[in-house]
Image (tube, helix red, strand yellow):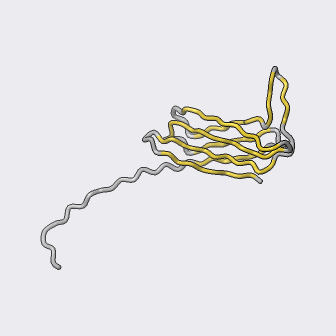
Amino acid sequence: MYYTGYMKLKTLTILVFVVAASLRLSADKKFAYLNFTGLKDVSKVNYVLTYDTNRGQKGLEGGMKLKKTTRSLRRQILGTCSSGKCVYHQGIKNVELVTTFVGRSGKLTTTTVRVP
């Protein structure tokens, strides 16, 4: 087959935003540190943190709406607090953080991070 003339090419633009979530436990396992980066084009972050304890599985949900920031760090207690007194869960293991990033364009990206 022979072609004559010019071919008109269409341009395809793909928007990719690189986001990340990391998870670290304090040495005494009383706190989980959640670090979210690459947030420049993200409007909202939702997360679920679950973990096993001596008394079964526990967890929490959280989220934040963002305005012009590139990173966010959260410290979450692994226990409960009431009237200024905290009770920390014991035997923390199998910690999992599932994070959903909502881009300003509406695109969703989900990541999972685990700490044994």
Q: Is residue 37 above or below residue 82?
A: below
Q: Residue furthest top?
A: 83
- Locate the C terminus and report the quarter of the image it occupies: bottom right
Q: Please state the horizontal and vertical placement of residue 64, each as a whole percent of the image.
A: 59, 33
Which one is in front, 25 or 63? 63
Q: Please state the horizontal and vertical placement of residue 12, each as a whole percent of the image.
A: 33, 56
**Left or right of 105 in this view: 46:** right
- Locate the N terminus and report the quarter of the image it occupies: bottom left
Report which quarter residue 101 is drawn in. Answer: top right
Q: Please state the horizontal and vertical placement of residue 76, each as a whole percent of the image.
A: 73, 36
**Left or right of 42 in this view: 24:** right
Q: Total marks drawn?
A: 0
Q: Is residue 73 above or below residue 81?
A: below
Q: Residue furthest front?
A: 56
Which one is in front, 70 or 44? 44
**Residue drawn at (45%, 39%) of the image:** 104
Which one is in front, 56 or 101? 56
Q: Residue furthest left?
A: 4
Q: Please state the horizontal and vertical placement of residue 38, each as a whole percent of the image.
A: 55, 45
**Residue drawn at (57%, 38%) of the image:** 45
**Left or right of 23 in this view: 99:** left
Q: Is residue 58 above or below residue 3?
A: above
Which one is in front, 38 or 30? 30
**Left or right of 89 in this view: 65:** left
**Residue drawn at (46%, 51%) of the image:** 16
